[in-house]
Amino acid sequence: MINPFTKNRVLARAARNGLLRRDRKGAQRARSAPQYGGGTRDSCGADATRFARVPRKWKSGTIHAISIVLSYEPLRNNLRGTLIFAALVLLAGLQYAAPQQQPAANPHYDPAIFQKHLSANETSFLNRLVGAPSGDALRDKEFRKLMHSVIPDCTFHYGWDMPMFDAVEKVLKDSLVPVEIRDGRYVTISGRSGPYLAGRGFLWIDLQEGIGLGAFFFHPTNGEPTPTVTVFSKQVKADTIGVSRLPPEFAADLRRWWAQAHIHPVVTTYFIAGAGKRMLLEHDEDFCVPVDGNTAPPSPVCDQMNAEAADIDLNTAYYLEQVHYASNATAWMIVGDEQAAWLRTRDTTCGSGPDPLRCRIRLTRERVRMILNRRPATRIARR
């Protein structure tokens, strides 16, 4: 919070130098700056008057005062004006470093991302598998056919390259966890003890909507961030995706499997859709909001979890850009000069504010979205 007394002293100094006038309502306004042709030019050749066109949302407090200074060339050209300008810039920096309200993520499930829904004839057989070990379900011909409708046709790196169908089969075929059905429609098949790299698998079918998703957890050793959870569905068509866009009932069952499989609450999360490309499954949930009727962690803990999730998403987005979103990438991540410079800027900007952690979360989220939206991928400079 900027000290009003300090700000008023600065504005009063500007008023004494004839740079401010008061309108009929007593509000301070800047006097018009002299115009020379298309605008005044400073010593570096930049157009000084364009800096006076400050966005409307900045037209308040210290930022408004800065627009006054920048719009009037004589003030910049004398010692007194320089001191006032320096004071205003310092105050503006303090105000900008303060936490700003972050736009809320869309909390709604988007059914439009699902294509080619399964018919009742393709899923009704699942009722007879309820209660059987999940490993036994994989020996059912109808279930294996259903798996091909849900698991994307892509190469997946689980220790070595293999079809993703084979990877899922490896972590489910010996599972003794029973097939479950909830509310008469949500069927789950899961495994918690894969043959290597702590592999675990999960399949979920909504009998009513005819949609299916799955998840695969393991500890990669190929250079990518580790450990990872890859959520997948051959039925999904999307370029970017966050947790909030998935069916809420799937998210609830996924969290339950996540906890039972003893997976850390915040890990790298990918999504593989029908196109077979691996993309970031963004942590757009808020760990400070209670879910499933459970109490949220204390504020310091959940804020740290949000910060950890943002940092993980940033590393994941940057890695995926480097490997061109390949589902079986095996490259080691390179921290480029651009990314290293941005991290230094973020830490410096947020380090001087009143709430460094939330500032870091906000700026990191913005950086993640910038990386996800830039196409084609920029060249990464090696350090």
Image (cartoon, rainbow, N blue to C red):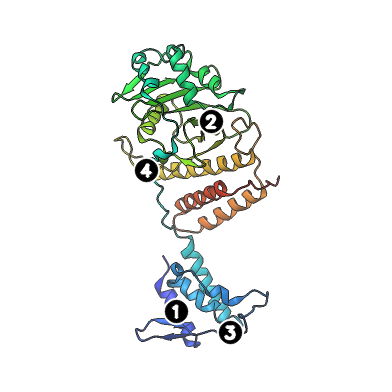
**Residue 60 place in picture, x, y as percent:** 42, 71
Q: Who's the residue at 56% across and 42% down the image?
A: 317
> Tag 3, which secondary structure?
loop
> Tag 1, which secondary structure?
helix
* Residue indicated by mark 4: 108
Q: Who's the residue at 37% across and 12% down the image?
A: 132
Could you classify mark 3 by the number of other residues whose Cα lies within 10 Å: few (under 14), some (14-19), or many (20 or more)?
few
Q: CA distance from mark 4 to mark 2?
A: 28 Å
The reply, left or right, for residue 248 in relation to residue 19 is left
Name the mark nearer the viewer: 2 or 3.
3
Quadrant (top left, top right, bottom left, bottom right) of the C terminus: top right
Name the mark nearer the viewer: 2 or 1.
2
Could you classify mark 1 by the number of other residues whose Cα lies within 10 Å: few (under 14), some (14-19), or many (20 or more)?
few
Residue 326, located in which quarter of the rendered image?
top right
Going by the numbered disc 4, the residue's amino acid type is His
* Residue indicated by mark 2: 227
**Residue 32 place in picture, x, y as percent:** 51, 85
**Residue 197 place in picture, x, y as percent:** 55, 22
* Residue indicated by mark 1: 9
Going by the numbered disc 2, the residue's amino acid type is Pro
Q: CA distance from mark 1 to mark 3?
A: 28 Å
First in sequence: mark 4 vs mark 3:
3
First in sequence: mark 4 vs mark 2:
4
Tally of marks: 4
Quadrant (top left, top right, bottom left, bottom right) of the N terminus: bottom left
> Tag 2, which secondary structure?
loop
Name the mark nearer the viewer: 4 or 2.
4
* Residue indicated by mark 3: 35
Name the mark nearer the viewer: 1 or 3.
3
First in sequence: mark 1 vs mark 3:
1
> Tag 4, which secondary structure?
loop
First in sequence: mark 2 vs mark 3:
3
